[in-house]
Each structure stands twice: as structure tokens, then as C-alpha cells.
Image: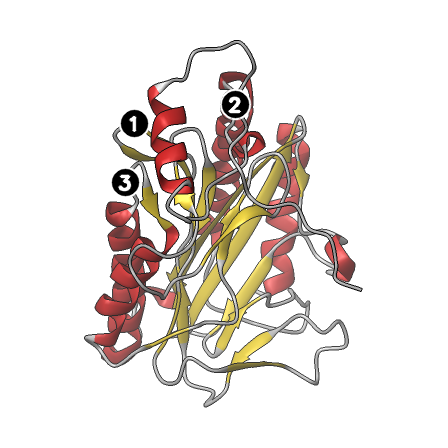
Amino acid sequence: MIQKKNRNTWSIIPGQELTAMDKEILYWQNRGKKVPTRDLIKTPEQIEGIRQAGAINTAVLDAVAAAIRPGMSTQEIDDICMAVCKEKNATPACLNYEGFPKSVCVSINECVCHGIPKPTQFLEEGDIVNVDFTTIYNGYYADASRMFIIGGKTTPEKEQLVRVAKECLEIGMEAAKPYCFVGDIGNAIQKHAHKYNYGVVKDLCGHGVGIKFHEEPEIAHYGKKGSGMLLVPGMTFTIEPMINMGTWRVFVDADDPYGWEVITEDEMPSAQWEHTLLMTDHGVEVLTY
């Protein structure tokens, strides 16, 4: 039996005159493009709630940045995140999410993402480390990650990877214009990464966020211009390109009993930066750092 599924269609409010946004979305919908449903457009109250969650998320990552150092265990990073959340009356979204046992993802070198903090895992000088945290505050979500070079210095190859990964985020944000498509973002990111012969991870992506941890649309970091969902003012989402020094291919570490840690297939380093973003009439507003 064929599964029933709702199409993505833009709903018109009965009795209300069409707005400029309605007309723009209907224009693309009538040309067969994927458009958002109205519930993906956040209200001013929801946007303010997400912004407040973003401010706390930034405070969490700032606390990590102030403390991170060689010899520190990744469990200590988790402890810092939990302490700031408690102080701010917030909740870490990752904790117990689909079996994830900690509050934060700490991913070192060839670990692309979802690294699980451990009391027996210690940071070494020259490591490149991604710290990815998501805050829930008053029911609203904000998600961001940063890269850290442990001890402040690493190899030129790793330094370049960290820099280019951040540039990929910034280029993706520049491509994110009102009434652009998700594919416009991915296309811009992959072009920049490929200049350095880096791999752009295809198995993982950014996502809508704000009311839930993961919402539509999926934000792929590769693709063709004009593909994917139309992005319109009021939508909130992450851009979080995972850039590998070698191949884009990844695997889940069989030694991880929780089945979360993602590793580059060639075990070369990976880097990632992430923001939660609000689409406005003039481009994206960054709600996290």
C-alpha cells in the first residue's frame, strides 16, 4: 500500500489579503519548488524565546573557551556545560537524547561529530576540537558549535582546515538570502571547500531548530543552486558544515557502545563551526556564537 504523506504546501489564511510573502511563496510553489509550511515561520514571541536560548548557549561555549586547555578531560567540558545550564535555569538538549549520555558533543581530530565526553579522554596540545552544544530554555532551542586549537598551536595543515571550515560557515551564511533555496547554501560551501580538496560530509546536515531540536528543513552543505526548500523570513535553522581534510565519507565508531561517534573514513582530521540563524528580510541574523 502506498504511504500517505502531506505535501509541503503554503496555507493561505481565509479572509486575509495575500501578503508579499504569500505571493512570493505561491510563485515558487506553483513552479514545483519545495516551500515551507506555515508552522515553520516563527512568531515574534517564538523568535524572542529562541534568541534567549541562543544567549545562554553562547554563555555555555564562552565558559568552555575560557577553560579549555591541554591535559583537560573531555568530561570536564561536560561538567562546565552542565554548571552553566544549572546557573541559567536551562537544559542541555543532548542529554539523554536518543540515548546520548552526556550534555555536550566533544569531537577531537578525526572525530567528525557526536564525540562523547569521558573522564579518561584528555586533550593534547595540537588537537583540534569541536564543542557542540544545544540549549533548551523555556521550551525553545538554540544550537551552536566552535572549534578550538588546544594549546593555541597545531600543524599548518590543521590550522588551515579549521580556518577554511569557518569560512565555509560564513560563505554559507552569505548565500542565505531571503527567498533563496537550501541548495544555494550547500553549493557555495562545497565550492569553497573543494578549492582546498577538502571533503564536505554528506551524511550529516544542518536543520531547522527553535521549537524542536530538529525541524525541517534539512540544510545540506553541498548541492545544486535552486534545489531544496525555499527559505523565507521568520525561519530559524542551523548551518554547520563538517569539512574533512580528506574524503567526505564517514563511519560510526564500532567501539562506541552508544553508537554515536562519527569518524572520517580515512581517519584524517575534520572541522566544523555552527550557528543558529534567523532568516530576515535582509539576510540571516546570528542568534548564537
Give the colouring mode of the picture.
secondary structure
Q: CA distance from mark 3 to mark 1?
A: 8 Å
The percent coordinates of residue 145 (x first, y second) are 46, 53
- Amino acid type of the residue tagged 3 in the rendering: Lys
- Amino acid type of the residue tagged 1 in the rendering: Asp
Residue tagged by mark 2? 12
Q: CA distance from mark 2 to mark 1?
A: 20 Å
Residue pictured at 77% horizontal, 53% vertical: 96
Earlier along the polypeptide chain: callout 2 or callout 1?
2
Q: Is residue 42 above or below residue 259?
A: above
Q: CA distance from mark 2 to mark 3?
A: 23 Å
Q: Is residue 160 left or right of residue 12?
A: left
Q: Is residue 60 left or right of residue 104?
A: left
- Residue 286 seen by the camera: no
Of the pair 285 and 158, the residue shown nearer to us: 285
Earlier along the polypeptide chain: callout 2 or callout 3?
2
Residue pictured at 49% horizontal, 18% vertical: 44
The percent coordinates of residue 119 (x first, y second) are 68, 67
- Residue 163 seen by the camera: yes
Residue pictured at 30% horizontal, 78% vertical: 198
Q: Residues within 10 Å of mark 1 (few under 14, many from 20)?
A: few
Q: Is residue 3 left or right of residue 46?
A: right
Residue tagged by mark 1? 281
Which marked residue is nearer to the observer: mark 2 or mark 3? Answer: 2
Q: Quadrant of the N terminus?
A: bottom right
Residue tagged by mark 3? 177
- Amino acid type of the residue tagged 2 in the rendering: Ile
Q: Is residue 142 above or below residue 100?
A: above
Disc 1 on helix, strand or loop?
loop
